[in-house]
Image (spheres, rainbow, N blue to C red):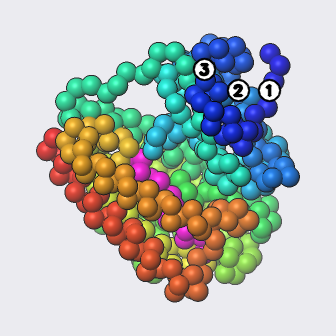
Amino acid sequence: MSRKAISLAALAALCVTGLAACGGENDDSKATKKGGATQVAVSMVSGSDGDACELDTDSVAAGPVTFTVKNESAAGLTEVELMDGQKILGEKENLAPGLAEATFTLTLGGGDYEIYCPGATQERVPFKVTGEAAAEPTGDAAELLASGSKDYTTYVRTQIDSMVVGVENLQKAVDSGDLAKAQQAYADARPFYEKIESDVEGFVMDGFDPTDNKGNLDYLIDMRASNLDEAVGWSGFHAVERDLFQAKKITAQTKKYAADLVTNVTKLAEVGKSLEFKPEDLANGAAALLEEVQSGKITGEEEAYSHIDLVDFANNVEGAQQAYAALRPGLEKVDAELVKTIDARFTAVTDDLEGYKDTKSLGGYRPYTAELKASDGKKLSATVQSLQDVLGRLAEKAATA
């Protein structure tokens, strides 16, 4: 097959003319198959119009599909997601130029999807899957909610596994002594925990009393300076952050912090293998992530040294949105009007965040400085509060469906 590069901008233009131009039944021949899976190549490139993601085909047949993502030269792009409405079906992050290609495979039913490349000149492009459409959710509300909760478990495990890779990369960068590289690796590793922290913050290692922070994985991984337990001391992300961004130097202690972080995140991954969630757990978790935004990110307390609070903010919101998306088919049967309201308020929050994106900054968002907090903090808080208010009603709906 001759490889045909399709830029996002070109795809957007084609799709204006109609669905057939976005990919139809006849476009299946453009895609190759390998090991039973249709292959789709996504290349991140830098051009005269800015950074772009280019696909070798915009249409495939329903079935197993492998996306292979390679960042050739786009310094402003690090992430690719396959979206089905609000739901992230698959993603790859931390894709800096020159790194080895990364893949993810999904079994897709017929329908209209989007390839999302945050920071690209054209961030979203339609992606068509032809053939038999995935079956619409059936069953009563409780059955749909339970099914969504099971799917969400896979999402959480995927984030934990990616976090293991992220902190291993952070440790390697710290051990190399390269401060700038370590700062970048810190920002790259943070999103995974922020998406799922409400799901994993209660884990205590075997043999420890639940009140003993020595066995509390959330304490050991994510404790901030403001809440230190003097009997346990400090470790985890923010101890590393202080050295990299305040002291701006890497010491033997920094290397120990990074090594301990890998150890504790690896323990979290082991615990994560047994994770199970009830629908109300997802609802409570989504609300808790929004509370995290209010209590730690808008205040600027979470990332006191690196000032990447807006990165954490965006990932708290994304985690809440994924929990909600898993519940959404069941919730539509319970309270369709509430679903419309929540959809609209998620859109308001994510639209607000768009204005703070900056591909030249660590993590892809503007630094949350004292000046930005003073000028924009109240506005951001009000938008999040509006969403938080309605998300708080989900748990009861989910538990009583």
Pointer 3 or 1: first along the chain: 1
Badge 1 density bin: few <14, some 14–19, many ≥20, Cα 10 Å: few
Helix, strand or loop status at disc 2: loop
Question: Which of the image's four quarters has the C terminus?
Answer: top left
173 over 310 or under it: above or below:
above
User: Is residue 14 visible in the rendered structure shown here?
Assistant: yes
**Residue bearing the label numbered 3:** 24
Which residues, given as a range, are shown in magenta?
Answer: 307-323
| Residue 114 is covered by the magenta coloring | no
- Magenta stretch prevailing secondary structure: helix
Q: Position of residue 235 (x, y in %)?
A: 54, 69
Question: Which of the image's four quarters has the N terminus?
Answer: top right
Badge 3 density bin: few <14, some 14–19, many ≥20, Cα 10 Å: some
**For this rendering, which residue is in front, 189 or 195?**
195
**Residue bearing the label numbered 1:** 4
Q: CA distance from mark 3 to mark 2?
A: 11 Å
Q: Position of residue 167 (x, y in %)?
A: 62, 55
